[in-house]
Structure formats: structure tokens, C-alpha cells
Amino acid sequence: MAASRYRRFLKLCEEWPVDETKRGRDLGAYLRQRVAQAFREGENTQIAEPEACDQMYESLARLHSNYYKHKYPRPRDTSFSGLSVEEYKLILSTGIESTVAFPGWFANDSLSLSGQGELSNKTALLDGKSCGIAQRKF
């Protein structure tokens, strides 16, 4: 039975994409590393908790298949900030040297992408008051 679990995890690792823009913090790369650690002996690995292993596989398979994205569809591909998916990918990438702060949300009230120019006109609306969200006082 361990052999079939091992093969299922290997197939999941092969299908799971690796995002090169998130070096050192990509879920696909982390998954490959954890599977290699958990199945050090390959198909001959003895699994101490088979139920937990199966539950972990099922959870990862649901994430990979976008089960929750389809179960709970979003009306728009944006969030309260108004930024697009592409803008979030740019902000979250590892290779870019960026300092992004949304006015009224963090200590400094600036928005900058060093060396990248202005991020978006949409972020100018994020002062806490204009988007209807009360500012936190520390």
C-alpha cells in the first residue's frame, strides 16, 4: 500500500507547477522537498500513520485541482484593493525589489515600487476612509 501512496504523491508533484518567481518560498518546490523527505526509501517506505498520509494527499489534490475555487466562485478576480491578479503576482514575486505600502494600513503612508515605476492608480484609493474600512489605531 505504501507503494501506491508513493506513486500518487509523485504524480501530484509532477503535476504541481513550480513558480520560479517565488524562489525559496514556492509551494510546489516545498511539496517536492517534503515528499522526498517523507518517502526516503521510495516505494519501500513504511508509513506510520496511513490515514493521515491519505488525508494529506486528498487535501493537496483538492488544492491542486482548484476544488475550492470552483466550489466558491468569486464574482471578480480582484480584492478590496482593486489590484489585478497580475499586479499581485508582481508584488509577490521574489525577484523584484519592492516596497509596497497601502496608505493608512501600514506605518509609512507611501506606495512605491523601487525601480519599477508607479504600481497602479487604483492604489491611491486605499486610504482606509475611501474604501469604507476603519483604520486601526495602535
Image: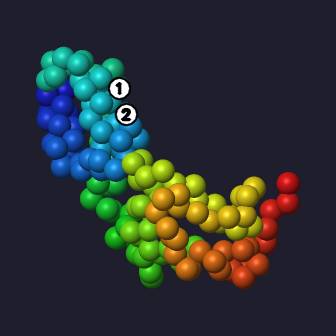
Q: For mark 2, what is the residue?
A: 52
Q: Which residue appears at 15% of the width and 18% of the height? A: 44
Secondary structure beneath disc 2? helix
Q: Few, some or many C-alpha atoms within 10 Å of disc 2 (few <14, some 14-19, many ≥20)?
A: few
Residue linked to disc 1:
49
Residue occupying image coordinates x 33% and y 62%: 67
Residue 118 location (% of width, % of height): 52, 71
Q: Amino acid at mark 2?
A: Ala
Q: CA distance from mark 2 to mark 1?
A: 5 Å
Q: What is the quadrant of residue 41 in the picture?
A: top left
The answer to the question of whether label 2 and label 1 lie on touching residues, with beta carbons closer than 8 A, is yes
Q: Is residue 56 something one can see in this rendering?
A: no
Q: Element type at marker 1?
A: loop
Q: Amino acid at mark 1?
A: Glu
Residue lying at 63% horizontally and 61% vertically, measured from the top left: 101
Q: Is residue 108 left or right of residue 115?
A: right
